[in-house]
Image (cartoon, rainbow, N blue to C red):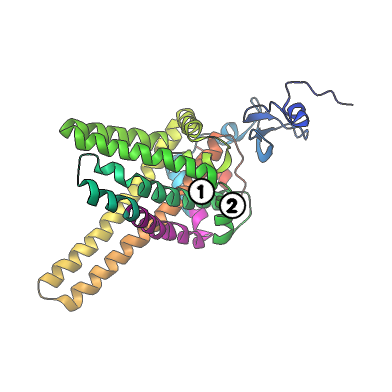
Amino acid sequence: MTRVDAGHPRYHRRMATDLPPAAWYPDPGGSGYLRYWDGAAWTEHLSAPVGMAGLRQRTGSPTGKQLLRTSLGLFRQNRRMIWLPVLSGIASAVAFLAVSGLVALPLLRTLGPSPWTALFVVPGAMAATFVGVFFNVALVFAANEQIEGRKIGVRQALGMAWSRRRVVVSWALLSAVVGTSLQVVESRLGVFGRLLGVLGGLAWAVATFLVIPVLAFEDLGPIEALKQSSHLLKTTFGTIARGALRFGALLLVWILLALAVIVAGVTLALAGAPVLGVPIAVVGVIGFFIVTMYLAAAGMYMRTILYRYATHQSLPDLGLDLSRTFQR
């Protein structure tokens, strides 16, 4: 009979008390790999242990160009997922207006405008944040399933995200509080406050870059999720920075092109050629919407790939030959 050490997660699961923290441990199934323990049960995630020829050693660090190509290629294989950012944008706006309308408007009528007016919209901001994070978690699940070789639909992705609703709610509360606090600082401290707001917003965006995959796959509270996202960012900063910059540059180029089409159409319409100008402007608006939604979805695919890379998980071949994609 195999002896199980008292410090091994299997022992703690049998005892059902004093469970070990979420981390990578030797796979109790004897695969020779590490398996992720989420704090309550074993997950399906495997990782090559230190010293083995894992992803990082076998393929090197992916470049921004390779990440961009792989993310866009994966997303194109399941374009139905574009509905998730579309629904997210609509539902977030509705949630914000509905909740803020119920809370902020009565307070504004009773107390009048004040420097603390921004606090009145915290419930609406939290509702909108919850909706946005919820749909992004669904996108991450869809991307992860596709990387594992399983293609799922929008309804399945939403169902998987719904299983993480408690984690998403707690994160939405923290995110809404941070966002509102930055707004208050900006409004109260003038130019200095605006500078602090910009720097604080940038720091928050960087620290939370990988928080959506962390919320999806790890049972952590909001503060722990933030720390984990920051930790993963530090360990793979160069890779993540390259990928993010590539995506940002691509997004900027396509948005500028769409805006140029809109400006051209409006200019023609004002110059006395509305028959030509209005359709061109409409095409530009539609193009702007499609570009932002398309790249928002592909961006979540990229973050999922980066999360798997940072946690040493494999990236199987899905017809894109990811092993070559991640070569230097």
Horizontally, residue 15 falls left or right of residue 116, namely: right
Q: Residues within 10 Å of mark 2 (few under 14, many from 20)?
A: some
Residue kind at label 2, given as amino acid type: Met
Residue 78 within the segment the image draws in magenta: yes
Name the one closer to the observer, 21 or 174.
174
Tell me the tag on residue 137: 1
Reply above or below: 163 against 206.
below
Residue kind at label 1, given as amino acid type: Val
The residue indicated by pointer 2 is 160
- Disc 1 is placed on an element classified as helix
Reply above or below: 245 against 32.
below
Residue 323 within the segment the image draws in magenta: no
Write the start and end of the magenta stretch as one range: 73-100
Q: Position of residue 52 (x, y in %)?
A: 66, 28
Q: Position of residue 46 (x, y in %)?
A: 66, 37
Decide if residue 255 is in sight here: yes
Residue displayed at 58% across by 43% down: 323
